[in-house]
Image (cartoon, rainbow, N blue to C red):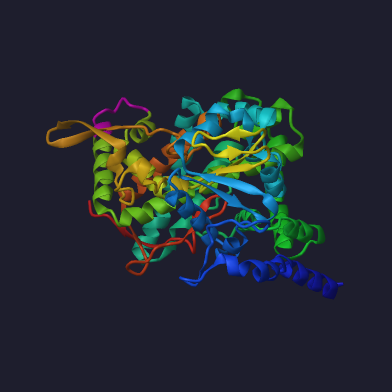
Amino acid sequence: MQKIMFELNSVLTFSSFFILPFFLFFYFPKVLDFKTKQLNLIKPYPVIGHLFAFYHHKGDTLFQWFCGLIISSPSSTFVIHRPFGEQVVMTGNPANVEHILKTRFSNYEKGPIFRNTLKDLLGDGILNVDGDTWRFQRQVAIHEFNTKSLRKYIENVVDFELFNRLIPILTTAAKNKTVLDLQDILQRFTFDNICKIAFGYDPQYLSPSLPKGKFADALEDATMISTRRFRVLFPLVWKIRRFFNMGSEKRLKEAILEVREFARSLVKQRKNGINTSLENEDLLSRFLKGGHFEEENVIDIVIAFILGGRDTTSTALTWFFWILEKNKLAEEEIVREVTKGRNREDDNKENDCSSFKEVKEMVYTHAALCESMRLYPPVPADTKQAETDDILPDGTRVRQGMRVSYFPYAMGRLESIWGSDWAEYRPERWLKEVNKDKGETKWRFVQRDAYSYPVFQAGVRTCIGKEMAFLQMKRVVAGILTKFRVIPVMEKGFEPVYVPNLTAKMEGGLPVRVEERMK
């Protein structure tokens, strides 16, 4: 039996290549530019579309190729032709983004291709559904994001995790001159936080021993393999592998089983000790108390919120600390802002919510985080599917059933949006100078158009956790930078690789040394 499965797996591995030699024979003379001796990868051809380009740009380089096409296109839009006539619109045009996220929102949903590809991992959670199901989950969840809940989140959850776990680990690392993987540390931090605020459970993943977590490893594998399904040129290949439980699909099934068992345990614990008081009720209790969901649906919701609450924030912070090392003036300005804010709080002893007020007033830090996410957005791209025929504002025709993807990563690199200095890290592009107080500049944050900066999506489907994410990130930045210098341990000139899965990790993590900052 094992021999049969091995042989079948081998056939499937190479089955997607059998078309290539066939079409090379017929198309090679037309595709090859004899002057440059290079394949013309931009032009689509009958039947095969951009097949040559897909095979040339393998793995994560395909994403960079897509973004390059968007950036070089006059309209910031490019249509990819997959084999056998399937077309996908890829855009970074703000007018198009507003069209699909707001103007014609009802015409552009996740769609069956997106949902089916991620169904095994996300099920019917809020990140993978449309219509009434999405609206109801959002309506229930949005109660957790009011001002009172956010203040409680910062003062009780984030501050505890920051001062009782994260800071002591960094202090020990500074004393022992230990190299830490900051990406891993931040993922542990945000994982503990989302579990406590949303599910009333403390996994203690950021304890001093830095325990190896089966769930965290399984979630990493599950998101990576699920994302790679989108890159398979012929989806039938991964579907057959899943049917026969082979190769990467076997690993995915095992990883998802681990993820769902963890989520199931959270649901059961909350069911057994559910709090009847709305005052102290967490997100999971709200979903259970309503009685509108079966247990499997609640598990889907749990996984979606863990993925959204853990990976996006930790990813944003990882890239932020890396880019800050190359921009010392910005780091100094952040430290100055935080220090000034704390001095003001010391003068006002009657303030009983200094942590919450402090992060709300960190204007320059907020701009610095926005600028970092412009260049390295936590979610690299998002895809919708057209319900009916349509025409985008730039004139691109969309047929019913076609997918339309917008790329925040590419949009952050468009000169038409950000100017000729788009490659520079400048938090000041988000700020307006109000006046100078005793020689020091006062800033006012200037919000950019959400459709030019859809890092948190935009329109009807804007991320409901946006403010919570900013509050958490600013609290972490303030807590770390006022005490430590974070120094990436990389060779001079090394550029980390942006890995575009469901969330964009830094390949290999971010190894850092930590030094205590001189007072």
Q: Is residue 470 above or below residue 166?
A: above
Q: Position of residue 335 (x, y in %)?
A: 27, 45
In the displayed image of the protein, which residue is found farthest to the bottom?
Answer: 3
Residue 143 in the figure: left or right of residue 85: left
Q: Residue at x 25, y 33 (%)?
A: 432
Q: Is residue 482 above or below residue 362?
A: below
Q: Position of residue 34 (x, y in %)?
A: 50, 71
Name the residue nearer the viewer: 132 or 266: 132
Residue 231 in the figure: left or right of residue 437: right
**What span is in magenta?**
344-352
The quarter of the displayed image where residue 235 is located:
bottom right
Q: Is residue 498 above or below residue 22?
A: above
Count of all numbered marks drawn on residues in the image: 0
Q: Residue at x 30, y 47 (%)?
A: 420
Residue 275 visible in the shown view: no
Name the residue nearer the viewer: 340 or 362: 362
Residue 354 visible in the shown view: yes
